[in-house]
Image (tube, rainbow, N blue to C red):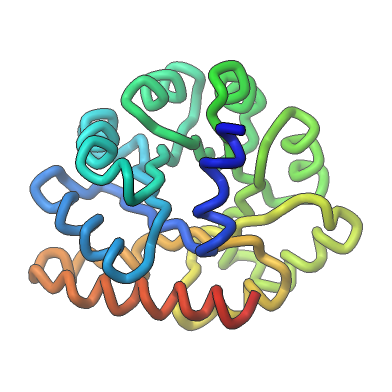
Amino acid sequence: MKTQEVLTPLLETGVVAIARGAGSESMLEVVDALIDGGIRVFEITADSPDASELIELVTTEFGDEITVGAGTVLDTETARACQLAGAEFLVTPTLSTDVIRTGNRYGTPVIPGVMTPTEALTATEAGADLCKLFPASTVGPGHVSAIQGPLGQIPLVPTGGVSLDNAADFFEHGAAAVGVGSALVDDEAIENDDYDQLTRTASQLIEIAHTHR
């Protein structure tokens, strides 16, 4: 039940916002702006400075409005630390069955990074809930439908290079959702305190997901 509750906002909205390297001084304003644009799922990468503290901060401040997860989880130690900080899901850049097992052990959904049909099936059989197609820009939208031809039961979340320019194509080829980093959590806009830009981009991505899935 917990897994379904965590994944529902992702599958309903179709967009995961990814913050990499953002600091605590701007994080709450970033999340607030994205919520205003319709984002309900937010990933803080574990290689960000003070990632555990940021996960705890965002969860405490926005726990009723947004689902917070940890990305770039490379090992079981990091996975467990993020879980204890409040991460509701875990995302890996590669296929790590150890991280999948850690997530399953403590009831935390895991979205591992895959590129091939073999990796996608291996991840699913190991207990993954969704699979992150990464890096999506390397293979393009057609790779989603190519994998789902024989493996239509595996939901794919293209991530890496997804933007307003190509998100519709990924959805039209069968993506369950997309993960969007710098094209949404724009460093330049944040540096200029232009949080309205984040809200506008978020709103456009949510509309694309609604229209093209």
Quadrant the C terminus occupies:
bottom right
Taking the spot 22% from the left edge, 77% from the top edge, the residue there is 197
Nearer to me, 26 or 62: 62
182 vs 141: above or below: above
On the rendered structure, is 175 left or right of 85?
right
Q: Residue 181: x percent and y percent?
A: 39, 60
Taking the spot 66% from the left edge, 47% from the top edge, the residue there is 131
45 vs 211: above or below: above
Q: Residue 72: x percent and y percent?
A: 44, 39
On the rendered structure, is 181 left or right of 160?
left
Q: Residue 17: x percent and y percent?
A: 39, 58
Taking the spot 33% from the left edge, 51% from the top edge, the residue there is 65
Q: Residue 104: x percent and y percent?
A: 62, 23
Quadrant the N terminus occupies:
top right
Taking the spot 72% from the left edge, 36% from the top edge, the residue there is 123
Q: How many numbered marks appear? A: 0
In this view, the residue farthest toward the right is 150
On the rendered structure, is 148 left or right of 206?
right
208 vs 91: above or below: below
> Residue 146's quadrant in the figure?
bottom right
80 vs 191: above or below: above
Nearer to me, 105 or 115: 105
> Residue 33's quadrant in the figure?
bottom left
